[in-house]
């Protein structure tokens, strides 16, 4: 993969370019928007990376070059970046960073770079990006440097983390799983609100997996019409929830076996939520649901294999106090194949 990195802070640009190079990508850093067009042409780049501050330039370059994808990072609230994600199907990744003098998180940069490179190897450049590399042998998915699989839970946490996995078939099992996740957070002696918040996040993701995702043989939603009903899923419909922590961050994954989540469900839901939380009656949910995800996590990863599964991973940084967390820039990633 060939990438051009526009970053006005030269030190940050060199650092991000080094992380890209570590994945085997070619990375050319530039610090002046006027240098971008020439760098793209000289490198025949596949990817243009920049702060959302330069989002208009990224969008313009993508429109002019059919094979080019975009990646953004930001120190600002997500709403401004979301505009570019909504307007361009070739911008699926926004990385949050602490401030304009700091790079995005190294772990996140490397993971995203690897996954974009893997997706580019597997499909023509005009298609949507796909899934990525797995580093979790316990997930049942093999390590694959071509990016054919989404990462397991271990890819988001430091070695030695602790966690658990549960199959969830019924409303009662959902409530038990939420309680166990909240208890797991409380055991870390963090503010009680963190456990409550992560429990709310687990409940929302499980509701999506159990009520919105299942369909009958004709493709009609089975339970989306009444999210208050007690339900019992068939074995082939059950949701899976994974929770883990390494003491520095929390990670939560929820997976359903349907693969029906669309990109616009995520983007439009977040846009409605950030604009004030308009209800979405058409799909049995609400923009407010996406806001629960946004407000309870530092980063959200949506992985969809059409007709096979949807997996959503949420991360929370424990080293931030709640005031810092509320003002922190969020990351958003959507992958489909």
Image: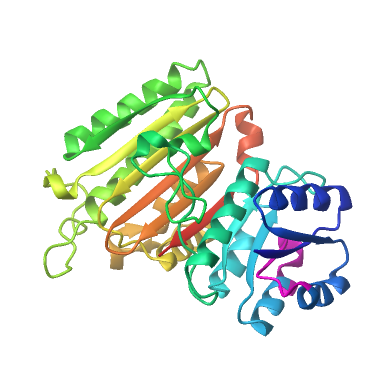
Taking 36 as reference, is 291 above or below it? above
Residue 259 x, y percent position in the rendering: 30, 59
Q: At which x and y percent is residue 195?
A: 44, 27
User: For this rendering, which residue is in front, 306 or 224?
Assistant: 306
Q: Between 35 and 279, which is closer to the camera in this rendering?
A: 35
x, y percent for residue 297: 52, 41
Vertical arrangement, residue 188 with respect to residue 283, above or below: above
Q: Residue at x 61, y 78 (%)?
A: 67
How many marks on residues?
Answer: 0
Q: Residue at x 46, y 66 (%)?
A: 268
Quarter of the view holding residue 184: top left
Question: Residue lying farthest bottom?
Answer: 64
Which quarter of the image is occupied by the C terminus? bottom left
Q: Is residue 89 left or right of residue 23?
A: left
The location of residue 115, given as percent across then percent down, is 54, 55
**In the image, is residue 302 above or below residue 230?**
below
Left or right, residue 262 beside residue 125: left
Residue 125 among those drawn in magenta: no
135 with respect to 19 (left or right): left
Per the rendered image, the range of residues in magenta is 43-57
């Amino acid at each position: 993969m060939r990438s051009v990195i526009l970053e006005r802070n030269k030190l940050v640009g060199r650092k991000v370019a080094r992380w890209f190079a570590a994945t085997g990508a070619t990375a050319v850093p530039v610090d002046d928007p006027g240098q971008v067009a020439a760098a793209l042409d000289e490198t025949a780049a596949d990817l243009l990376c920049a702060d959302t501050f330069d989002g208009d330039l990224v969008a313009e370059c993508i429109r002019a070059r059919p094979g080019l994808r975009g990646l953004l990072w930001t120190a600002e609230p997500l709403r401004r970046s979301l505009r570019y994600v909504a307007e361009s199907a070739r911008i699926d990744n926004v990385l949050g960073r602490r401030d304009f003098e700091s790079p995005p998180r190294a772990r996140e940069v490397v993971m995203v770079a690897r996954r974009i490179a893997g997706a580019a190897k597997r499909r023509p450049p005009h298609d949507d990006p796909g899934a990525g590399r797995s580093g979790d042998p316990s997930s049942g998915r093999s390590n694959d440097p071509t990016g054919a699989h989404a990462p397991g839970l271990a890819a988001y946490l430091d070695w030695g983390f602790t966690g658990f996995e549960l199959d969830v078939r019924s409303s009662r099992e959902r409530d038990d799983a939420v309680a166990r996740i909240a208890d797991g957070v409380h055991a870390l002696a963090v503010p009680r609100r963190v456990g409550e918040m992560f429990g709310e996040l687990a409940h929302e993701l499980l509701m999506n997996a159990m009520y919105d995702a299942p369909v009958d043989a004709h493709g009609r939603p089975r339970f989306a019409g009444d999210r208050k009903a007690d339900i019992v899923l068939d074995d082939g419909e059950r949701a899976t929830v994974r929770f883990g922590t390494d003491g520095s961050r929390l990670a939560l994954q929820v997976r359903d076996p349907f693969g029906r989540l669309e990109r616009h469900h995520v983007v439009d839901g977040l846009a409605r939520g950030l604009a004030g939380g308009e209800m979405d009656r058409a799909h049995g949910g609400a923009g407010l649901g996406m806001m629960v995800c946004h407000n309870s996590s530092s980063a959200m990863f949506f992985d969809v294999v059409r007709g096979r599964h949807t997996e959503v991973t949420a991360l929370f940084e424990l080293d931030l106090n709640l005031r810092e967390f509320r003002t922190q820039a969020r990351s958003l990633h959507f992958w489909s194949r």
